[in-house]
Image (cartoon, rainbow, N blue to C red):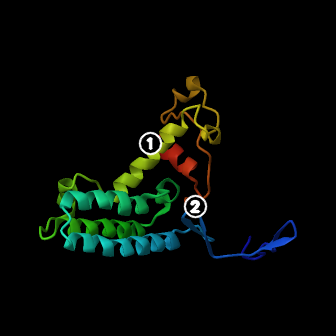
Amino acid sequence: MFKKNPPSSLCISGNVINKVKCFKLLRINISDDLRWDAHVDALCAKVASRLHFFKMLKRSGLSSDDLLCFYKCLLRSVVEYGCVVWHHNLTTAQSDRLEALQKCALRIILHPITLPYNTALAYCETESLKLRRYNFPNKFFKQICHPENCLHHLLQSKDNPSVSLRLRHSTVYPIPQVRTNRYCSFINYALKKYQ
């Protein structure tokens, strides 16, 4: 519908709001097509610049334990920021790009030892970024399910237990219907995956 009849310019208090392809909101790059290419590109560029300092720390003789701490605090935290919002819509290629950043960091930490990626993860007592991005939203959703949570109002009222327990796939909260996965919000995704 919008392709045939694009909406006219939005005007708020006499000010025309410009249309943009991509904008940054709370350090998350959101594009007009709701794809995450721009955000993943920005993350990769930011982490790549920090990997340069990471290599310099390794050359200056910083221990592997300190390098691992540096990685977890200053590099991995960048890649995982806001992942509850965007991780469920990543393509496999985008996820692999982010995983490659961790592989590069682990190679620097373990140099001159060369280990396969899964062995290096176990050796450094860490896990893949994909698994961590899967677990964060689960924890976040469980926090939202508590009635005292400030976001609890985003959930619909609970299903009637006497009815839902008799169903094959019983759920606590009803799952709203969406037409496509791209426009599926975190709440819809969490209601399908985590309850």
Could you tell me the amino acid type at mark 2?
A: Leu
Tell which tag, 1 or 2, sits nearer the viewer.
2
Q: Is residue 7 left or right of residue 137?
A: right
Q: Which residue carries the number 1 mark?
A: 139
SS state under label 2? loop
Up the image or down, 43 lies above or below 170; here it is below
Q: Which residue carries the number 2 mark?
A: 26
Spatial CA span between label 1 and label 2? 21 Å
Where is residue 151 drawn, in percent x and y? Answer: 61, 41
Q: Is residue 51 left or right of residue 66?
A: right
Position of the N terminus by quadrant: bottom right
Q: Is residue 75 left or right of residue 85?
A: left
The mark tally for this picture is 2
SS state under label 1? helix
Where is residue 118 drawn, in percent x and y? Answer: 21, 59
Dot 2, how many residues are within 10 Å of its Cα: few (below 14), some (14-19), or many (20+)? few
Considering depth in this image, is 123 or 92 the residue closer to the camera?
123
Residue placed at 22% from the left, 51% from the top?
Answer: 125
Considering depth in this image, is 81 or 176 the residue closer to the camera?
81
Q: Residue furthest front?
A: 60
